Image (spheres, helix red, strand yellow):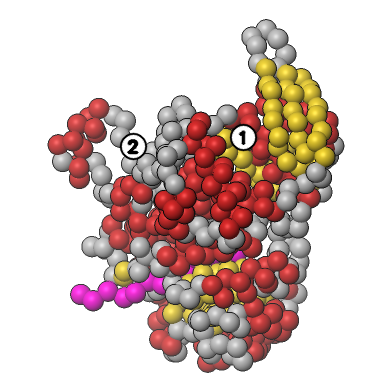
Amino acid sequence: MKKDQLVIFDTTLRDGEQSPGASMTKDEKIRIAKMLEKMKVDVIEAGFAIASPGDFEAVRAIAEVVKDSTVCSLARAVQPDILRAGEALKNANSGRIHTFIATSPIHMKYKLQMEPDQVLEQAVNAVKMARDFTDNIEFSCEDASRSEFDFMCRIIEATINAGATTINLPDTVGYGEPGEYGEMFSRLINAIPNSDKAIFSTHCHNDLGLAVSNSLSAVMNGARQVECTINGLGERAGNASLEEIAMAVRTRHDLFPVETRIDTSHIVPTSRLVASVTGFPVQPNKAIVGANAFAHESGIHQDGILKHRETYEIMRAEDVGWKTNKLVLGKHSGRAAVKARFMELGIELESDDAFNTAFAQFKVLADKKHEIFDEDLQALVSDSQLAEMGEHFEFLNLEAVSKTGAAPKADININIGGQENHAQAEGDGPVDAIFKAIEVLAESGADLQLYSVNAITQGTDSQGDVTVRLERNGKIVNGVGADTDILAASAKAYLHALNLLESDASRAHPQRDGV
Ligand code: KIV
Ligand code: ZN
């Protein structure tokens, strides 16, 4: 039986970025967008063009460089948003405007303070306006899973007549349950006379841990687009995870009447890139991309696997890119080999200076750590891009002493605005002492919300990947730092977070700002 194509719509750069602290710079978004394009994602939602000049610029830049995936911008159902989205997508090979308005009684009454007929009229006008820019128009009924059936029939029929080619029915608050959410799709598709003129799409949030199940249930009931994010990143508890959707459809092809275009071998490298850019580590037991997803601990399982792999494995680790995590380089590797590996990882260092900085750091790392893995290269690029950005707070060196029975102490040298400064402090532990020493100089007034350490690769010589989340006046940032010395990595991550607090590169949540 011929399968339908399931359109994979990735919203890591838009809904994913709405996770508090997950803001990304334009360059980071471009790197992720290029990886998504390589993975053959059909639609990349690159941002919310009107939310800020930074968001506009990111959508515009991604529309210029990404040619094989459709590039999309979000827009509320109002003229300024649609104009801004249209402008940002001007140079796209294939561009989509995604406009939305809430359709549930609770949102219409309290948030929009509008009558349903006014909402319907505004939605239709927005879709018509979007047609001045593109024929590829998505309309979303925000909070669809809590909307009234008859009203949804009316607004969907009207927006399809106005030119919408995709109809998205989000479970905005993660309230849906698979049976009920799936049934909403089949009932609407059957009841709406022009439903065959549009692709129905699912967009699920994970507040009850059901985002992937709800999305798959929608697919079983007629949805042919899934909106999802890498690592399930997203507003609150996140969105449905792209890797879980893609692998569920592929692994259970006996059940699903659809197939995707996704090249699954890029899943793990893309997951690593998103984790390192956002500073949101992947939990070890996360399906598909967690460090333990293919690790077998029990003796009975190991025995079974050795005798016949399929006894305990339903997917092959290499099919999702785990084998690309191979030893690649060492201290004798030359510039050409390092450059080629960067390219294979989708990392394009724009200038010679950027590459020279990265290569110099590679040599320092290779001296400390003999085996350099892809993840090390990714962490290293983040470091060299920081150096290129001209950091306000720059790590120089550190001495931290931790002795049983004595208070841990840290001595640190950092550049602040180009001037070398020194401070020392004691703390409850060496990391606490380092952060206190930095604060003697920075006096940031920021609140430490999260500190986490992960090993980038295996072995005791692995680099420690540290994330530090700071909050100041409602602005939340995630600093990341990598080093074979986890104390140095901690200092770098703290200073990175301080730099983000100082810079425009990160911003508050766009929808919270009430754009
Ligand atoms: O969750 C949601 O409803 C959304 C819409 C803007 C599509 O993200
Ligand atoms: Zn959403």
Q: Residue at x 69, y 23 (%)?
A: 399
- Does 207 appear above or below 168? above
Q: Which residue is mark 1?
A: 489
Regarding residue 245, the answer to whether it shows in the image is yes
Question: For this rendering, which residue is in front, 424 or 426?
Answer: 424
Q: Quadrant of residue 253?
A: bottom left
Q: Label 1 sits on what residue type?
A: Ala
Residue at image point 49% right, 46% down: 377
Q: Can you name the residue that lies furthest to the left here?
A: 307
Q: Quadrant of the N terminus?
A: bottom left
N-terminal-most mark, 1 or 2: 2
The answer to whether residue 6 is magenta is: yes
Image quadrant in which you'd find residue 2 = bottom left
Q: Amino acid at mark 2?
A: Ala
Classify residue 229 as left or right of residue 264. Answer: right
Q: Which residue is mark 2?
A: 295
Left or right: 42 with respect to 129?
Answer: left
Dot 2 crowding, Cα within 10 Å, few <14, some 14–19, many 20+: few
Above or below residue 37? Residue 165 is: below
- In percent of width and height, residue 74 lies at 62, 73
Q: Is mark 2 within 8 Å of ligand 2?
A: no
Along the line of sight, the residue nearer the viewer: 169 or 266? 266
Which range is magenta? 1-16
